Structures are given as structure tokens and as C-alpha cells.
Amino acid sequence: MNFESIISFLAVLIVILFLLFSTFLLSVKREKKLSNQLLAAFLIITAIDVSAFFYHQYIEFPLNLEMLRISVSSFKNPLLFLYILSVIYSNFKLKRKHLVHFLPWIIAIIVLMPNFFLASNEAKIEFLKNYDSNLEIQILDYFGDILSLAYLIGEVYYISRYRKLLLENFTNKTAFKNYIWLKQLAILLFIGQVLTWIKNYSRIHLSLENTNSLRTIILLFGVFFICWIFLKAVNSPKLFKGVDVHLKTSKEIKEYIIGKENNPKISILKQFMIDQKPYLNPSLTIRKLAEEIKMNSRDLSVLINQNLSQHFFDFVNEYRIKEAMKILKDPTKKEFTVLEILYEVGFNSKSSFNTAFKKHTGLTPTQFKKTT
């Protein structure tokens, strides 16, 4: 099989798709421009990296510029990491501390300075000819692999923390769309990273044919990746409404003392839920509940999540399910459909209602209705 022609074709296709979608991201009017800009920057850097498979046929860069083109790929991981943070936090801003993400690229330039950037033209040609066998490149490759793993771990940590914040502060399932998007993105990034690690190993230890077959697989994965992102952007135009950057999980609120002194507050909270039924509001958040009950939202978060050992999401849904069970048992409301009941008790989708109902009762609403 002629992998080289396939690789060139796929590389050209990816570069065109990535640049077109980057243009779309930079031109579209959205509240969260930073997220679009970071994702566009990642796609442009990736396009520059992938262009290595075909651009030599049309243009020849100076050797120093060629090495800078190669090293620019070190920006991909930081850009994706910052992009994920910008999606999670609604008020995320780039600060001076984020300049630390430039360090890997600066280190790479410093490492390559003696034997490449400051070397003669002949030495540079020889260096590029034996690129993989150079000690500097081997060190930088290992360093890059470690950094890639570190960034992946960091992304998984922040995405997991984001899920906790959502469970502790929101009940509306639409608030979880960002989390689902980021979770899927993290899975795809992990697959892409594993494929890259295998390809890098093959490039050094296996045959050129094996390496080219892996390059083809990675490029096909790249085509799938950009198509997936595009479909997500088209089908979910209101995606990327994150949480406040200062919002903390209940465990992170260290100054709050958990003890018997909270018992009266628990009783007040439970009585308020029974009397006022705030859970009937489908868009209830912990901040809204705190305002209604005249309590600090941070205190309420710890009260529910630590003292009651429940996420706010499950705490509210438990009251909604109890209300739904009352309606299902009420003989005067036998004509109510499941859809009418779920809207009546504060849910806004059938799937989330069925999931919550089965979690609390072990039965679906329809099964429960038959037992009454």
C-alpha cells in the first residue's frame, strides 16, 4: 500500500478542515470568545504541525524556521488545557501566571541552541537528516511525553472537579452539557495521545512501513476529531456556560467546621423543603435556595454535601421523587401521564426523571404506578 500518498492527502484535508473551522471559531459572535480563540489556536498549531507531511513539495523554509515549526507543537497541550479551563469557568481569564505554559517551548529552544541554532548550515542539515538519533531530540521527546501525561492528568482532575461542582450547586440537567462535552473530549484526547505515543515508539524502533500505517490511523482520527467538534458546535450552539472560577467544592471550604452545631440548620432546611417546596422550580440552584432560606450559599453547600452526605443534585431530586410518588399513588390523579408528572415536580426531561426515580425507588415510574 502506498502510505505516503494517503498520508499527504489526509494531511492536506486535515489542514484545510482545521483552518476553516478555526476561521469559523474566530469570526462567530459568542459570549465566550476566549474559549473559541484558544480552541482555534490549538487547531492552527496542529495544522502547522500536520503540514510537515506535504508542504516540502511546495515551499522550503530556512532551517531555523523549520526547527521552530517543529517545536511549535509543544503549545498544543497547554492550549487544550487552558481551553478546558475556559469552558469550565464562565469568568476564566488569561493571567501572567499562565505564561508558565511557554516554558516547555523555551526549554526546547535552549536545548537545541548549541548543536542546531548556533551551528553551521551543514551541521543543521546533518542534524535534521539524523533527527531521531540526536540526543537532544530523544531527551525532548521523553520530556514531551511526560508533559503530555501531566496535562492529561490535569485535564481529568479539573473535569472531575467540575462534575462535583455541578452536583453540589445545580439540579437542572442542562447544566451538565458542558461536563458531558468535556468528558467526551478528554476520552478522545486520551485515545489520540496513546496513538501518538505508539507512533513515536514505532518511529524509533520499528520499520518505516509500520510508522506510516500508524501515521495514517492518526490522521484518520484527526479527520474524525474535527468533524466531531464541528457537529458539536452546530448541534449545541449554547454550549460553554461554565461555573464561577471562584466556586469551590464543599471539601475545599476548609474554614467551615462540621459538627453538632449544624443540626438545627439541617432541621430548618428540611422543614423549609417540605413547607415551601422550592424543588418544584426546575432551574433551582444552591444559590437560589440559599437566598430563599436566608443562609450563606457556602454554608448551605457544606451542610448538604458534608453533613447530609448528599450532593445538592441528589438532595433536591429526592424531594422531587417523593412528590412524584405522592402523585402516582393519588387515585384522583390517575389520569396524569408520566410526562405531566415530571414537569409538575420540577424535572425538565423524561430521561433524567426516569434515572432519578429508579435510583431512589429501584423501579421506573411506570413500574411503580402498577404496584400502587
Image: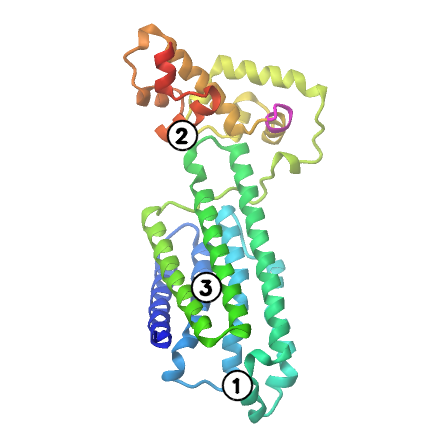
Secondary structure at badge 2 equals helix
Amino acid at pointer 1: Lys
Compared with residue 343, is residue 267 higher up or lower down, i.e. above or below?
Answer: above
Amino acid at pointer 2: Ser
The first of marks 1 and 2 along the sequence is: 1
Task: For the N terminus, give its image quadrant.
Answer: bottom left
Residue 244 percent across, percent down from the top left? 53, 42
Residue 249 percent across, percent down from the top left? 60, 37
Residue 292 percent across, percent down from the top left? 52, 22
Mark 1: few/some/many CA within 10 Å (<14, 14-19, 20+): few
Q: How far apart are marks 1 and 2 (CA)?
A: 58 Å
Magenta highlight: main SS: helix
Q: Report the residue marked by disc 1.
A: 129
Q: Report the residue marked by disc 2.
A: 352
Amino acid at pointer 3: Ala
Q: Report the residue marked by disc 3.
A: 41
The first of marks 3 and 1 along the sequence is: 3
Mark 3: few/some/many CA within 10 Å (<14, 14-19, 20+): many
